[in-house]
Amino acid sequence: MNRQEKRRIERQNEKKEKMFYMTEKQHQIKAYELLQKYMEDLKLENIKSTLKLLFPIIALSLHDKFGFGEKRINKIIDKIKLQFDCINSNHLSFEDLKNECEKFNIKFDWNILEKNVS
């Protein structure tokens, strides 16, 4: 490698090492965006963890108490997944679900989410 090639490579490396500086406002915006992404990822992970626990509980309860088989349980699980997708895409809120349950006189302890589970 001759001197000219070495200098060309050095110039290319210098271009790569340029640093760009952001204003404080740009830092705040970037930090906010990263926090929002982190919160969204955390929300999805929490939903996934909840569903991993919830689906088997629902399936076993329906089977043991009401004799539901594989076909009916899978239909219900698919419907629940659809409801979670609607909530996740902001097409449906917790309040909407609560109002629908009240409309059909479905009684539920809404404070169950605030109780400590041991």
Image (cartoon, grey):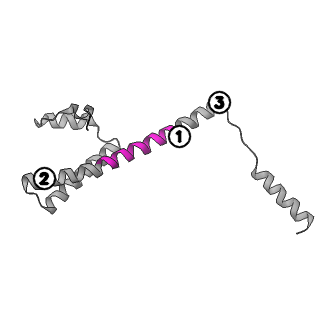
Dot 1: element: helix
Q: Residue at x 50, y 38 (%)?
A: 35
**In the displayed structure image, the side of residue 88 where residue 63 appears, left or right:** left
Residue type of the residue flagged with mark 1: Leu
Residue occupied by mark 3: 24
Residue occupied by mark 1: 34
Is residue 37 covered in magenta?
Answer: yes
Magenta segment: 33-50
- What is the spatial separation of the Cα atoms under label 1 and label 3, in whole angstroms? 15 Å
Is residue 9 covered in magenta?
Answer: no
- Which sits in the foreground, 64 or 29? 64
**Mark 2 or mark 3: which is in front?**
2
Residue type of the residue flagged with mark 3: Glu
Dot 3: element: helix
**Mark 2 or mark 1: which is in front?**
2
Looking at the image, tell me whether mark 2 or mark 1 is earlier in sequence order: 1
**In the displayed structure image, the side of residue 48 where residue 76 appears, left or right:** left
Looking at the image, tell me whether mark 1 or mark 3 is earlier in sequence order: 3
Find residue 30 and report its horizontal and vertical position in percent. 58, 37
Would you call the spot at circle 3 few (<14 residues within 10 Å), some (14-19), or many (20 or more)?
few
Mark 2–mark 3 contact, CB under 8 Å? Answer: no
Residue occupied by mark 2: 62
**In the displayed structure image, the side of residue 39 where residue 11 appears, left or right:** right
Find residue 38 and report its horizontal and vertical position in percent. 48, 42
Q: Residue at x 39, y 42 (%)?
A: 43
